């Protein structure tokens, strides 16, 4: 199987680095949702705009947004 984002070989949906980035996005969303009452898609778009977001997280956010539409 290949990572859905970077096509590296993996045994799961994402490679190790993208999996960790995905887990971080999901974990942090609860905090954003409580503080700002934001939707999942709005949250992901904010991650993409944030200059301090890492490359792996941005790639995962971009991929997840593409799956929403």
Image (cartoon, helix red, strand yellow):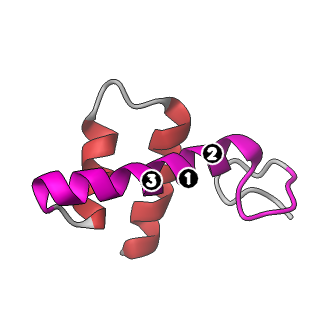
Residue at the outermost left position: 36
Secondary structure of residue under mark 2: helix
Location of residue 18 in the rendering, given as x and y in whole percent from the top left corner: 64, 46
Q: Is residue 64 left or right of residue 28?
A: right
Q: Which mark is residue 23?
A: 1
In space, the residues marked 1 and 3 are separated at their CA atoms by 6 Å
- Residue 53 in which image quadrant: top left
Q: Are marks 2 and 1 in contact (CB under 8 Å)?
A: yes
Q: Residue at x 56, y 44 (%)?
A: 21
Distance CA(mark 3)–CA(mark 2) = 11 Å
Query: Pointer 1 and pointer 3: residues touching (CB < 8 Å)?
Result: yes
The residue stretch that appears in magenta: 9-37
Q: Secondary structure at mark 3?
A: helix
Residue toward you, 31 or 20:
31
Residue labelled with disc 2: 20
Q: Which mark is residue 27?
A: 3
Give the CA distance from mark 2 to mark 1.
Answer: 5 Å
Q: Position of residue 57 (x, y in %)?
A: 49, 41
Name the residue rendered at 74%, 56% in the picture: 3
Which circle, 3 or 2, is nearer the viewer? Answer: 3
Q: Is residue 45 magenta?
A: no
Q: What is the quadrant of the C terminus in the image?
A: bottom left
Residue 45 on image: x %, y %: 27, 51
Magenta: main secondary structure: helix
- Label 1 Cα neighbours within 10 Å, binned few <14 / some 14-19 / many ≥20: few
In the figure, 66 relative to 32: above or below?
below
């Amino acid at each position: 199987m290949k990572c859905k984002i970077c096509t590296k070989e993996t045994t799961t949906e994402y490679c190790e680095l993208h999996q960790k980035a995905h887990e971080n996005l999901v974990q942090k969303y609860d905090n954003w949702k409580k503080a700002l009452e934001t939707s999942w898609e709005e949250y992901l778009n904010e991650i993409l705009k944030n200059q301090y977001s890492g490359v792996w997280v941005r790639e995962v956010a971009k991929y997840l947004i593409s799956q929403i539409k």
